[in-house]
Every structure is written in C-alpha cells, then in structure tokens.
Image (cartoon, helix red, strand yellow):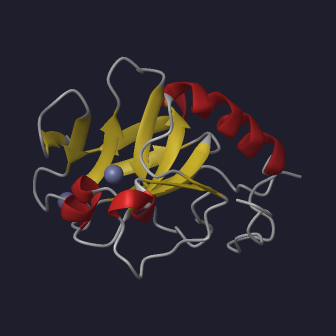
Amino acid sequence: MNDWKLPWEGGCRCGQVRLKVTAPPMVTVACHCNGCQRMSGSAFSLSILLPSDGFQVTQGDPVLGALHGPVRHFYCPHCKSWMFNRPPGMDAFVIVRATMLDDPSWFWPFIETSTREKLPWASTPAVHSFEAFPDPADYEPLMKEFAERFREGFNPRGKAPARAPGA
Ligand SMILES: [Zn+2]
Ligand SMILES: [Zn+2]
C-alpha cells in the first residue's frame, strides 16, 4: 500500500495559479537561509523536491520573481505567492513550496539547510541538518535514504520520527 495519496493539488493565496503533483517527494526540506526568511516572511521555507515530470501547473501563468538570477523563483502574477523554484542546470527537478498544497498536513522536513543563519529559537524535526547547503554529491545518498525510509509515504502520517541518534 502506498500512503502518499497522490495526486496532490495546490495553489497560490488567491487561487489564480493551481498546481498538481503526481509523483512522491524525493526529499523534503526546511531552509533557514536569509533569502528564504525574506521570501517566506517567516523563519524558514518548506520545500518538496520533485521530479519535473511529476509536477504540473494546471491553471494560471506563474512569473519569475525574487532575484531573477540562476535559480528561477516562480510567483503568482496576482497575489505574488512564492510557489516553486527551478534550480539551474537541473531541469529534471522542481522545488515546490510545501504550504502551496491544499493539504500540507503530512509534511515535515527530512533535512534542514543553512542552520548557520537560523533564528535562535527556530527548530525543526529534520533528521539531517546542514550549516549551509549540502554539496550536490550529498543529495544522492539523501534521496536514496528518503526513498528507502518513506517508500510508502510518511508513516505515521504527519508525524516526524524521533531524531536519528547522533544526527
Ligand atoms: Zn495568486
Ligand atoms: Zn533558503
């Protein structure tokens, strides 16, 4: 039994842009970097790394925002919600803001990044913490571990596991 209950739908604050997810996450992330703090208006951003072919914009035309740099950040043209990113040179992946989902209740971050920049009180249940961003080479084992641990969905649903010893 697969507990992911795909597909998932989501959308921006105003509803003009709608999304659909048809593939399970490859990894889930909380990012504490200053950029995410500014763009999210909060202590950290919450992201789902997905294969591009498991993600669709089903309504509306997201526009580029934020730094307009190599990482393309897509926003709703009307309400300006930050919805997803496309990382440079990695067309196979898309990074979707978890809280755009209509039901983000299952979400918790498996990894957290840029903890060096985190607000002193901000903590997450992430199993792996990185002071900055993981090296590209770190992602493959993380995705492998994620796939093995959560083959059938996050279980128990919506609850993070106990932190791994020594993590
Ligand atoms: Zn909108
Ligand atoms: Zn960030």
In this view, the residue in front, 92 or 61, is 92
Q: Position of residue 83 (x, y in %)?
A: 30, 52
Which residue is at a point 23% across and 42% down the rendered structure image? 74
Q: Position of residue 118 (x, y in %)?
A: 36, 67
* Occupied quadrant, residue 162: bottom right
In this view, the residue in front, 37 or 81, is 37
Which residue is at a point 13% across and 44% down the rendered structure image? 65
Q: Position of residue 35 (x, y in %)?
A: 23, 54
Q: Is residue 16 left or right of residue 67?
A: right
Q: Residue furthest right?
A: 1
Residue 125 is at least partly visible in this image = yes
Q: Residue furthest bottom?
A: 121
* Occupied quadrant, residue 140: top right
Which residue is at a point 41% across and 47% down the rendered structure image? 132
Ligand 1: image quarter: bottom left
Q: Residue furthest top?
A: 89
Q: Is residue 2 left or right of residue 24?
A: right
Q: From the image, which quarter does the C terminus lie in? A: bottom right
In this view, the residue in front, 91 or 127, is 127
Residue 16 is at least partly visible in this image = no
Q: Is residue 14 left or right of residue 84?
A: left
Q: Is residue 17 above or below residue 68?
A: below
* Occupied quadrant, residue 71: top left
